[in-house]
Image (cartoon, rainbow, N blue to C red):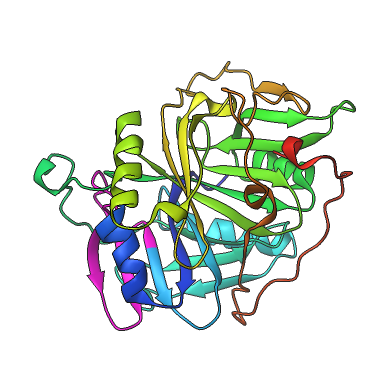
Amino acid sequence: MDFNIIRIARTVINVKDLERSRAFYVDALGFIETERDDEHLYLRGLEEHTHHSLVLKKADTLGVHALGYKVEKDEQLEALEAFFKQQGLPTKWMPQGTQRALGRSLRVHDVSGMPLEFFAEMEGVERMLQRYDLYRGARIQRIDHVNCAVADVEKAYDFYRKSLGFRCSEYTANDDDRVWAAWLHRKQGVHDQAFMNGEGPHLHHIGFWLPDPLAIIHCCDVLASLGYGDCIERGPGRHGLSNAFFLYLRDPDGYRIELYNGDYLTSDPDFKPIRWDLDDPRRQTFWGHKAPESWFNETMPFLHIETGEVIPTAEPTLKKIKPEFVL
């Protein structure tokens, strides 16, 4: 393989009101505002040493422009372009200077239609990890993962593992041993990219790492005190899958954000993926309480890398079952 994908590194999403979004992400959740202009807000976590991990772009239409992955070296972008072109998948170069703080990048659509972005260089900034005087809200540390609904999980699972070099930490399978959901990683945690069975491609959520479970509890108190109690969709709780402590929120535009802490190391080459049965309710919430219907049924669209239009979706290939067993 002529390229080395390091980790999920940023996402770019449309929002309708930058001031409203800033109040939620910066004042309530505690993201660091690196920079802003009339059309963009660039945010990062306290641990991050690069310019941003989340870009909020002002627009009338909601949607996700790209899921950004960092690669080891800039010259590997040509290898990625050649690979995606061989697969007959769309590619588009974003020259250096066309995106704030980012070197040149390559945008593509994967086999599910999701828009991905690959880059090697981003402007550095001061790392705020030990600026404890700036810790507030959820004490966001860094971007951790994205989770996406796709029509054919097995197709996505095979493509990311066999062609892009991802490894699987955990997966859910049905009685026929068909893959229903999968957690795939490049860094040494549980996942950078997760796939769940559903109408897609759609973004389900963006996950951000927190310093400890108490940061989640504290965030709930802060959200409630600021009048954002209705933004809490699910949790706090512990996943069976990943073992992580979690809280799911909905931002003012409806994007789902997961606050996440406590998964485990996956670096050993002989680590074997953990299989979960589809009918085991502990997968989604280890403590047993169910997720709300909105968690299964409400997602956000992806946007085409050339036109910026919403990407058409397809129904899932595997048979639908009761919502409480979907993940």
Question: Residue most toward the top?
Answer: 270
- The answer to whether 61 appears left or right of 149 in the picture is left
Q: Residue at x 40, y 52 (%)?
A: 229
Please say whether residue 250 is visible from this viewpoint. Answer: yes
Q: Is residue 314 magenta?
A: no
Instruction: Note whether 17 is above or below 69 in the view shown.
Output: below
Q: Is residue 50 magenta?
A: yes
- The answer to whether 68 appears left or right of 300 in the picture is left
In the rendered image, residue 298, in percent from the top left (x then y), is placed at 65, 57
Span colored in magenta = 30-54
Please say whether residue 212 is visible from this viewpoint. Answer: no
Q: Residue at x 46, y 40 (%)?
A: 247
In the rendered image, residue 228, in percent from the top left (x then y), is placed at 38, 56
In the rendered image, residue 269, in percent from the top left (x then y), is placed at 54, 20
Viewer-nearest residue: 282 or 271: 282
Location of the N terminus by quadrant is top right
Q: Quadrant of residue 322?
A: top right
Instruction: Note whether 242 is above or below 260 in the view shown.
Output: above
Viewer-nearest residue: 150 or 261: 261
Q: How many marks?
A: 0
Location of the C terminus by quadrant is top right
Q: Quadrant of residue 169?
A: top right
Q: Residue at x 89, y 44 (%)?
A: 319
Viewer-nearest residue: 119 or 221: 221
In the rendered image, residue 2, in percent from the top left (x then y), is placed at 55, 47
